[in-house]
Amino acid sequence: MNQDDMKKAVARAALDYLNEYDMVIGMGTGSTVNYFIDLLSSVKSRVDAVVSSSDATTAKLKALGFHVKELNQTGDILLYFDGADECDQHNRLIKGGGGALTREKVVAEAAEKFICMIDETKRVDLLGGFPLAVEVIPMARSLVARKLVKLGGQPVFRQGFVTDNGGEILDVHHLKITDPVTLEQEINAIPGVISHGLFARRGADITLIADSSGQVKTQT
Ligand SMILES: O=C[C@H](O)[C@H](O)[C@H](O)COP(=O)(O)O
């Protein structure tokens, strides 16, 4: 089974968590989420409305006839579904490969339960192999980059990419993330940082992990 098939398998398994009708749910961004949204069409009556984490996800949801609501209209939500770029044994995550991390973090924070969908290639013992995306306001980019070097990383400007919030992204390579909660706070504290893709304080509650035989394991 290739990686795309594993993404489809884990998306299928995540559907089991939609076990009520007329639910208001949160939706992440990325290829795994796109498979999940396609499958969600078959159980539409269980979904009253969706809070989206990106313009791309909103467009896909609307094209399939889902009702998309602003988080300001819904208050807290029950479930949030999203993929990730890396996940450790404590369900702490690196996200943001697609640049949607800030809104993803906001919607995840509003959810009672965050259900993360990954394939086994993304399950790691130590976070940081995948570059950590840090979203910055454009005028602060160089300042933030220098601070990230002091934290031990090698930031690379994601040229030509602008986030849904008008921010820019620094992809930080070679971070040894031995204390994810502390590093999350340290990066949050740099002036000019909008948000970043380390989800440590609020990681996933349940991570579903598909392996190459199509089996899906649950990590809580
Ligand atoms: O900004 C992108 C998101 O954090 C995605 O959840 C993450 O990059 C995983 O994406 P995919 O499901 O495409 O591998």
Image (spheres, helix red, strand yellow):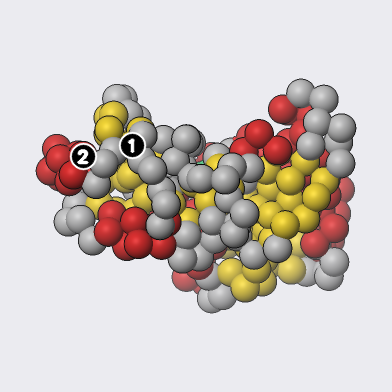
Write the residue at 64% across / 65% down: 205
In the rendered image of this protein, does residue 48 appear above or below residue 62?
below
Ligand 1 has an atom within 8 Å of the beta carbon of the residue at disc 2: no
In the rendered image of this protein, does residue 89 appear above or below residue 25?
above
In the rendered image, which quarter contains the C terminus?
bottom right
- The image quadrant where one finds ligand 1 is top right
Rounded to the nearest angstrom, the CA distance separating label 1 from label 2 is 9 Å
Of residue 64 and residue 194, the one placed in the foreground of this image is 194
Label 1 Cα crowd, 10 Å radius (few <14 / some 14-19 / many 20+): many
| Labels 1, 2: front one | 2
N-term-proximal mark, 1 vs 2: 2
Tell me if I can see residue 195 in this picture: yes
Q: Position of residue 89 (x, y in %)?
A: 62, 54
Circle 2 is placed at which residue position? 149
Under mark 2, the amino acid is Val
Circle 1 is placed at which residue position? 172
Write the residue at 59% across / 69% down: 111
Of residue 88 and residue 17, the one placed in the foreground of this image is 88
Write the residue at 28% across / 38% down: 153
Under mark 1, the amino acid is Val
Write the residue at 47% across / 35% down: 129
In the rendered image, which quarter contains the N terminus?
top right
Mark 1: secondary structure: strand
Left or right: where 218 falls relative to 149: right
Q: Position of residue 114 (x, y in %)?
A: 63, 62
Tell me if I can see residue 28 in this picture: no
